[in-house]
Image (tube, rainbow, N blue to C red):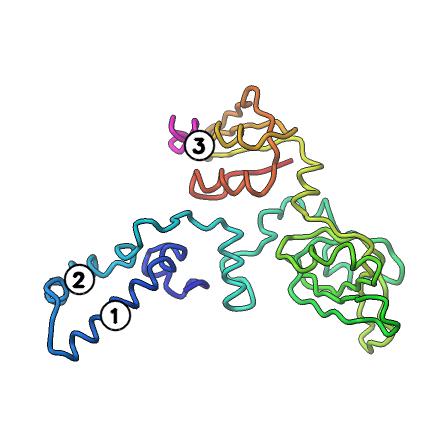
Amino acid sequence: MKAGAFDFVGVPRWRMLLCVERAMDRGARTQRDRAMGQSDLFGAFAASSGSGAWELERPELYVDPGADETPWTERELLAEEKSALGFYISGHPLDRYADDLARLGTPLDAVKEMGNFQEVEVVGVVTALREWTVKNGSGRMAKVVLEDLTGTCDCLCYVSEYIEVEPLLKSDDPLLIKGKTRVDADDETKNVLVRVASVERLADVRARESTLVTVTVEPEALTAERAARLTALFEAHPGDCSAYVKVREAGKWEAVIRVKGARVHPGDELLAAVDHLFGGRVTGVA
């Protein structure tokens, strides 16, 4: 369910998970009643009414009234996919940063072709981590597998750096890693590693280097209600970036409007909230 096996039902995954317990209780009760020769008035109706049966069995009918019905963000959905399967299906955490990847770091497939001791900056998400205590007992070091949209690369983190960056390497956040390449002499394939010097959250890097946030929507999407909610989101995330709304009708015209007085922080929280408001990815930063 977390990975989308029941997406065909047409109910969001987060909502289906909210109703699992009640649905299972209902199923158990129905089986118990059948074993005792009893029937449910509504169950009998559902069994005989064709399309009505489907409507009565819709999972959203089972959500507890007091349940938290906050939809998942794109990041939360991907995290649930990975927790269930070990990999992503419907997207990748770096998709939101696709326009920034070439500017911020060297693609990992290119790192494979580099030689020893070259300074490099790479961007990706950690997909595997192995840590161990060094022989003299002075601390732990780690090797991680970093993944971007072009491939993977091993990154080696020594004791002094690992103390500082361990929480980041164990998070699901897209990261910017700075270091130097090292050809692994113990590997017959001459695998190129990156020895880690520093690690930052990619969201923090982008926020620091960005100057504007743009929201691109179709004319019919920018209703008065959404415009008011968009303004409220901007006010709730103050920062140093200008905010623009680009209204366009594909292939015909577009208008760019600067949101007067808005200075925003282009963090993932704001971008995800704006995307959710308009029902798709509409935000961009530069």
Q: Residue at x 26, y 55 (%)?
A: 61
Mark 2 residue crowding within 10 angstroms, few (<14) / some (14–19) / many (20+)? some
User: Can you say which quadrant of the picture contains the C terminus?
Assistant: top right
Circle 1 crowding by C-alpha within 10 Å: few under 14, some 14–19, many from 20:
few
Q: CA distance from mark 3 to mark 1?
A: 49 Å
| Image x and y of residue 257, in percent | 52, 23
Q: Is residue 116 left or right of residue 43?
A: right
Q: Residues within 10 Å of mark 3 (few under 14, many from 20)?
A: few
Q: Secondary structure at mark 2?
A: helix
Image location (x, y in percent) of residue 162: 78, 59
From the image, tell me which residue sits under label 2: 53
Q: Quadrant of the N terminus?
A: bottom left
Q: Position of residue 17 (x, y in %)?
A: 38, 60
Expressed as whole percent of the image width and height from the top left, the position of residue 200 reads: 73, 49
Residue lying farthest to the top in this orientation: 260
Q: What residue type is disc 2 on?
A: Ala
Q: Residue at x 39, y 49 (%)?
A: 68
The disc at residue 249 is: 3
Q: Amino acid at mark 1?
A: Gly
Give, as a three-letter code, the residue at label 3.
Answer: Glu
Q: Residue at coordinates 73% horizontally, 46% vertically from top-left?
A: 104
Q: Residue at x 43, y 33 (%)?
A: 218
Q: Which residues are magenta?
A: 218-229
Main secondary structure along the magenta-highlighted residues = helix
Closer to us: mark 3 or mark 2? 2
Q: Which residue is mark 1?
A: 27
Q: Does the magenta portion include 223?
A: yes
- Residues 68 and 283: in front is 68
Question: Which label's residue is closer to the chain start, 3 or 2?
Answer: 2
